[in-house]
Amino acid sequence: MSLLTKGIGAAKKVKHHFQDEIKRRTPVYISPVRRIERVKTSERICAMTFDDGPCRLPASPGGDRPLTLSLIDTLEKHGAKGTFDVVGDTSTNYPDVAGKHGSASWGGEKYDHYPDINKDSDGGAANCPELIERILSGGHEITSHTYAHILYGWKPLVYGRRKFLGDIELVLSDLEKLHSLMLSKYNYEIKLSRPPHYVDRISNHLTSYDAYACMGYQYMAASFDGAGWLPLSSYQAEVEATWKPMERALDIDPDFFCGQIIFQKDGYNMARRTPIADGLEKQLELLDRYGYRVVTVSDLLKQSPFADCANGDPAYPYAKKLLETGFCPAFRDNTIRVEKPVTRGELAMIMFGTQAANDRISIIKSGEKSHFRDISTSHPYYAAIKLAIKANCFTVDRVFRPDVPITSKEFIFFCGSMFAKSPKNIPYSLSRVDVLKILADYI
């Protein structure tokens, strides 16, 4: 293993440790946008996502067909459906020069270029209509990896020298460009998105979650790394890295991949090789052996939408009905958390969170002063709380108490204003299941 590869591996560990620490310290809020990494199910079903394509260039080394077509052929040989997380076109990401071969900036120092620098015309949905048509005709899914694959905000670790958008309007414009292309040319509506390099922070307290809420998207993450992006000492080592960890995981626990989303690459890795072209066959053979079905992410979510609540769990039918009718029963990490009582702020967000998405951006950009002493305008619930108060669902003064559990008396008042009818004989201490059931029954 080269020093460069060891350095990349060490940087990856530092990055994951850093992200885990941020995740541990960050409060989790009810949200119209759920970060979907995996879902709860006992069924042997999983999804595979392929980033950065479509790619017209052949697999490397030794390929003679466009990489995207090679991946589709392999998927369909096994009766699998893929989710292709595509870009639009990176040809405007200049002036730029190639970074060091094998480094994170291999495809460009200032921007990403797919499938490679100065070869942008061989990748992306705008340049490869024949590949987009082939993806769709095979029943595979297309999701948004943005049009130009420019970072939403500054990422000092690894990508500190990269250009970034840094403004919510620019992010929305980029997302809308790919969305409109797919809708106008293919009559295909994108529903899921993954930000470039998982950079969420944009600016001014706004993040990818705000952008996706405005677009009506869910945040498509992943729970297992297919490793095809990582350069190793040889191509053979890279191919083995795509399937050996999967083999070990299944050997320990045959149900390991139930509900998981597997991250893959529809393009070159940092060494300009495509180990997924050979590794995908081995991955699918393993999953076949253990009786797994590989479906699109959207089909996976139809089977089970939540990370901690599946069919048969007490809250499941109520949370699912609320979700399907446009409300927000889940937290940003895609959990329901039935053991946690519903707070005043959460109740406002459950019922008004989707409606408040655009209001939240307007409030923050306008510099509006908070109406409350205990909650700022940048709080994830502020816009929804304003709408709930406007609908006369709460009686408040200058203190809202967003983190205080809702009382039965307050909930009766809320439902009376929201639905013009109030629940009767409800428990004095309301559980989350109680609240979700009543709301689901009333909508």
Image: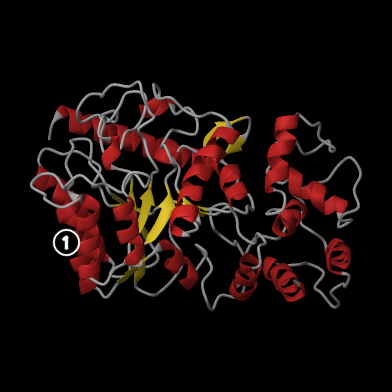
- The single residue placed furthest to the front in the displayed view is 185
**Quadrant of the image for the C terminus?**
bottom right
Q: Is residue 217 left or right of residue 8?
A: right
- When the figure is inspected, residue 281 is found, relative to residue 102, above or below; the finding is below
Q: Is residue 152 visible?
A: yes
Q: Residue at x 15, y 46 (%)?
A: 238
Question: Whole-percent x and y of residue 145?
Answer: 42, 45
Question: Whole-percent x and y of residue 9?
Answer: 25, 36
Q: Which image quadrant is residue 233 in?
A: top left
Q: Is residue 251 visible?
A: no
Q: Residue at x 9, y 40 (%)?
A: 234
Q: Which image quadrant is residue 172 in?
A: top right
To which residue does mark 1 refer?
282
| CA neighbours of label 1 inside 10 A, class few (<14), some (14 to 19), many (20+) | some
Q: Is residue 219 left or right of residue 372?
A: left
Q: Secondary structure at mark 1?
A: helix
**Quadrant of the image for the N terminus?**
top left
Q: Is residue 297 left or right of residue 56?
A: right
- When the figure is inspected, residue 106 is found, relative to residue 259, above or below; the finding is above
Question: Whole-percent x and y of residue 100?
Answer: 22, 24
Q: Residue at x 72, y 71 (%)?
A: 434
Task: Between residue 278 and residue 179, name the one nearer to us.
Answer: 179
Q: Amino acid at mark 1?
A: Lys
Q: What colouring method underlies this structural image?
A: secondary structure
Q: Residue at x 68, y 39 (%)?
A: 361
Question: Whole-percent x and y of residue 124?
Answer: 34, 44
